[in-house]
Amino acid sequence: MIGIFIILIISWIALYLIEKKNLLVLGVWPIIKRLKQFVIGFAVTAILCAGVQYLEMVLKSSSWGLNENFSTASMVNHFWWDFRSVLTEELMFRGALLYLLINKLGAKKGILISAITFGIYHWFSFGILGQIIPMIVIFVGTGLMGYAWALAFSKTSSIAMPTGLHLGWNFTFNTIFSKGPLGEGLLISSAGESISDWFSLIGLWIIPLIVLFFVKYLVPKEEGDLISGEIENFH
């Protein structure tokens, strides 16, 4: 949480010094509207993630079973970890910096810069720096997803939907299907047949494209505090 507070303080200072604005420009109000956007985003990526896991189960002829050692406290702890990590990244890449980039450079350039930096960031967070093929695969996948989430921020004038989109995938992947760094979550997979490594591209490349389609064509553009006019170029 200390890291999140530091990012918030730096964000507030940057917004005030450059735009004479405060953190409310990140779109936390009206609260009911933002909660709705958050829930929609969460549901979209949670369903997509579950779909990928189901397809993998079918191809591997495996099955999922409940983890009997996974308690309510475990669920809360896992969710809190997912939420903190997601919020940290959202504030870094879809927060004040993206707001300022859009206002200064326009939506197209601001979103593209955000997506590129998000892709490069994952070279370090995944520890793959120097491994050319994994770097390309991860850059394309996380860059596309970062682009979709940044576009969601720009179209809704809020950090709520991109946070929901981000958390929906991470929580379902890490906590529900036990695929992340937290170890065993709610469901545990039985051993199955091996499948091609190319299957991972469904989650890494195809899902981001689906999310981008959803954001671009199904999320309505709002007239907010973000720069207007530029965003029409995305339709």
Image (cartoon, grey):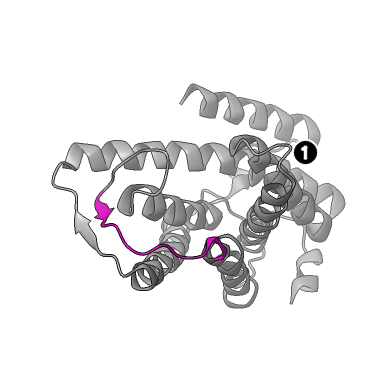
Q: Quadrant of residue 192?
A: bottom left
The part of the chain drawn in magenta is: 186-198
State the residue lying farthest toward the left.
68
Circle 1 residue: 19
User: SS for tag 1?
Assistant: helix
- Left or right position of 154 against 85: right
What residue is shown at x 42% (from left), y 39% (from top)?
181
Above or below — where is 13 with respect to 170?
above
Percent of width and height locating residue 10: 66, 26
Amino acid type at image mark 1: Glu
What residue is shown at x 70% (from left), y 57% (from top)?
140
Looking at the picture, tell me which residue is in the foreground, 162 or 142: 142
State the residue lying farthest toward the front.
193
Does residue 206 belong to the magenta stretch? no
Q: Quadrant of residue 125?
A: top right
State the residue lying farthest toward the right.
105
Above or below — where is 154 with respect to 103?
below
Percent of width and height locating residue 45: 46, 63
Percent of width and height locating residue 17: 77, 29
Q: Main secondary structure of the magenta part?
A: loop
Disc 1 residue crowd, few under 14, some 14–19, many 20+, Cα 10 Å: few
The number of numbered badges drawn on the structure is 1
What residue is shown at x 31% (from left), y 53% (from top)?
176
Percent of width and height locating residue 126: 59, 39
